[in-house]
Image (cartoon, rainbow, N blue to C red):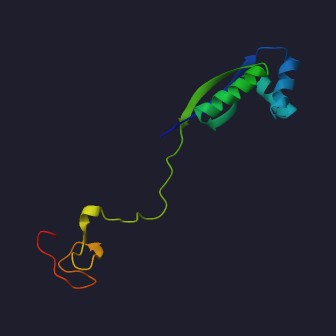
Amino acid sequence: MNKKYRVVFLSLMKGDEDVKSGLSDLGLSPAAVEKIIRSAPAVMKANMTLGEAREYADAVQEAGGRVNIQEDGFFEKPKKIGKTLGIKPLDQFTMCPECGQKQPKGEACVKCGSLFKETQV
């Protein structure tokens, strides 16, 4: 299972207005920026891969915020959809020496009816 991460805003590294402007440039609304700054430490974004969390944290730091990346659990394993195909392994197949028909091992060829030797079964 893959871990998931979150980015937590801790504090300001620059002046208040510089950080507000920088975070707004990242697409956050002024109200969201105010709330994050006021309630620090605050989760800014969650459910990311480590690479995504690092990119997001770097952008916030460039905007003037001090952040931390934290583990946030695991992504759920994707569930299998449908049934397995039930494909048999190659060692359970044979080829008729008379007509060349490829088929599951048996006593006789399904195409020409030729009997197989016991060593082929």
Residue 42 seen in the current view: no
- Give the image location of residue 49, x and y in percent: 59, 35
Considering only vertical position in the picture, is 111 above or below 118? below
Considering only vertical position in the picture, is 29 above or below 88? above
Residue 16 seen in the current view: yes
Position of the C terminus, as image quadrant, is bottom left
Considering only vertical position in the picture, is 102 above or below 81? below
Picture quadrant where residue 105 is located: bottom left
- Give the image location of residue 50, x and y in percent: 59, 31
Picture quadrant where residue 35 is located: top right
- Give the image location of residue 56, x and y in percent: 70, 30
- Give the image location of residue 60, x and y in percent: 74, 25
Left or right position of 47 against 110: right
Residue situated furthest top in the rendering: 14
Q: Viewer-proximal residue, 54 or 118?
A: 118
Left or right position of 48 against 36: left
